[in-house]
């Protein structure tokens, strides 16, 4: 079941006649197997990356270089890994768009990437120097993003436009469950003598099991071979010009600004709890964990209805509501002087951000250039990867300046900066002309 919407409409002020006719065709709704097939592998990826980034990598870096040098060493690892991830995801996606095979368009990349990732995963516990750890970590980023670039294009490949919201909700639920389960399991295992080895084996097994589950769930037909010259196809792979797709560019800009706000808060949330809300240092980590649990639960409550509603109405309208909810909660959080008020604000924010997660992904998939879905989903992924690097760099300077004026003022200032980013991201939505799948 393939969505074949033309994407030339992104360059103009109106949809072409062919796109309008296609959007009005009656399409068969996907089944549960389709929804699971395009989303289930996200659970294993989120389970692994949630554990690696939040706990395992910082823990391993501190073991190797010690407390005094851990921040700089971790920063180098994260920045290098993010750069490799972004480049690999774009290129692997572009290759899967361009070079088909008798095993399907996306499947070979997912299988090869997952199998190759098992090698550095099993080697991870035995990397005892920073160069070795860097080599293993970069290998993981390369192999798993080699798989993820093509895999994420399965949603627009297999799910008709009118059902992207529901499919994105499935994906969002798997991602959130992985982000909860991964750090929880890693936290338990790292407290045991052989915990790192057990965790590495567990992650390798999970990634491969869920890769096999995807293959069983999704049937990919052999991809037809192109008659175009090799040189021409290679030029298409490296061509990332946004000019033909201005609307898609605004989707990226909107998400980039919002994720800047998200990572600005996340990077310094522990310090905000401790120095701005005045929570004792020994208790602050537990409060942070409780914030994450509350926002995750309410996020799950927001994802499913938002995805379903967005299939029946304007996705932009749902995003306006979701972002407005997040902004209102953020204002309350900035003004909060007690933990109960802060908890309430976090809960409301979680619901809004869950809705944003599902619907924003669906909107991005709706506006993809048809002939290069995986490549441009990789480009779209930069709107999440780059803010992870940029936001802490900017926020650290703002916090340092603000805290000179008074204890904790810098972290409150960061919340205001995050609100500004969120507002800009919401305003960028006004420049987007979306397709109207609910009129099919």
Image (cartoon, helix red, strand yellow):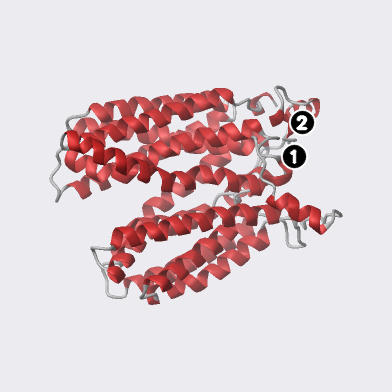
Q: Quadrant of the N terminus?
A: top right
Q: Position of residue 40 (x, y in %)?
A: 54, 53
Which residue carries the number 2 mark? 22
Secondary structure category for the residue under label 1: loop
Which residue carries the number 1 mark? 4
Asked if residue 209 shows in the view, the reply is: no
Quarter holding residue 192: bottom left
Q: Quadrant of the C terminus?
A: top right
Gap between marks 2 and 1 measured at Cα:
8 Å
The vertical placement of 332 against 231, above or below, is: above
The vertical placement of 425 against 75, above or below, is: above
Observer-nearest residue: 168 or 32?
Answer: 168
Count of all numbered marks drawn on residues in the image:
2
Query: Residue placed at 85% from the left, 53% from the top?
Result: 228
Query: Residue placed at 42% from the left, 30% from the top?
Result: 422
167 with respect to 336 (left or right): right
The vertical placement of 366 against 385, above or below, is: above
**Labels 2 & 1 near each other (Cβ < 8 A):** yes
Observer-nearest residue: 211 or 56?
Answer: 56
Q: Position of residue 317 (x, y in %)?
A: 53, 23
Q: Which mark is residue 43?
A: none
Q: Position of residue 104 (x, y in %)?
A: 73, 58
């Amino acid at each position: 079941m393939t969505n074949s919407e033309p994407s030339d409409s992104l360059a103009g002020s109106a949809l072409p006649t062919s796109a309008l006719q296609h959007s009005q065709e009656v399409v068969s709704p996907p089944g549960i197997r389709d929804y699971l097939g395009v989303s289930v592998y996200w659970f294993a990826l989120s389970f692994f990356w949630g554990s690696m980034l939040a706990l395992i990598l910082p823990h391993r870096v501190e073991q190797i270089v010690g407390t005094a040098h851990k921040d700089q060493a971790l920063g180098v690892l994260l920045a290098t890994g993010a750069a490799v991830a972004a480049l690999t995801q774009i290129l692997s996606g572009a290759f899967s768009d361009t070079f088909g095979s008798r095993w399907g368009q996306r499947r070979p990349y997912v299988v090869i990437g997952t199998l190759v990732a098992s090698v550095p995963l099993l080697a991870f516990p035995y990397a005892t120097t920073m160069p070795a750890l860097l080599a293993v970590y970069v290998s993981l980023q390369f192999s798993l993003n080699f798989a993820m670039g093509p895999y994420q294009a399965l949603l627009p490949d297999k799910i008709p436009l009118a059902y992207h919201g529901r499919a994105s909700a499935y994906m969002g639920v798997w991602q959130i469950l992985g982000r909860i389960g991964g750090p929880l399991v890693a936290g338990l295992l790292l407290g045991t003598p052989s915990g790192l080895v057990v965790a590495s084996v567990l992650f390798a097994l999970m990634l491969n099991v869920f890769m096999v589950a995807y293959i069983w769930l999704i049937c990919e037909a052999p991809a037809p071979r192109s008659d175009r010259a090799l040189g021409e196809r290679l030029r298409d792979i490296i061509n990332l010009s946004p000019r033909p797709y201005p609307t898609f560019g605004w989707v990226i800009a909107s998400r980039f600004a919002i994720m800047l706000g998200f990572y600005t808060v996340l990077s310094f949330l522990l310090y905000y709890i401790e120095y701005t809300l005045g929570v004792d240092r020994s208790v602050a980590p537990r409060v942070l964990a409780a914030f994450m649990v509350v926002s995750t639960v309410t996020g799950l409550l927001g994802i499913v209805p938002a995805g379903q509603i967005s299939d029946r109405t304007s996705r932009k309208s749902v995003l306006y509501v979701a972002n407005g909810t997040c902004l209102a909660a953020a204002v309350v959080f900035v003004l909060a002087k007690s933990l109960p008020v802060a908890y309430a604000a976090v809960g409301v924010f979680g619901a809004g951000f869950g809705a944003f997660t599902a619907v924003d992904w669906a909107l991005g998939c709706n506006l993809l250039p048809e002939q290069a879905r995986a490549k441009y989903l990789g480009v779209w992924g930069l709107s999440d990867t780059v803010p992870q690097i940029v936001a802490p760099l900017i926020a650290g300077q703002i916090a340092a300046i603000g805290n000179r004026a008074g204890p904790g003022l810098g972290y409150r200032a960061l919340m205001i900066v995050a609100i500004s980013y969120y507002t800009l991201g919401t305003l960028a939505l006004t420049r987007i002309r979306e397709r109207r799948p609910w009129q099919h």
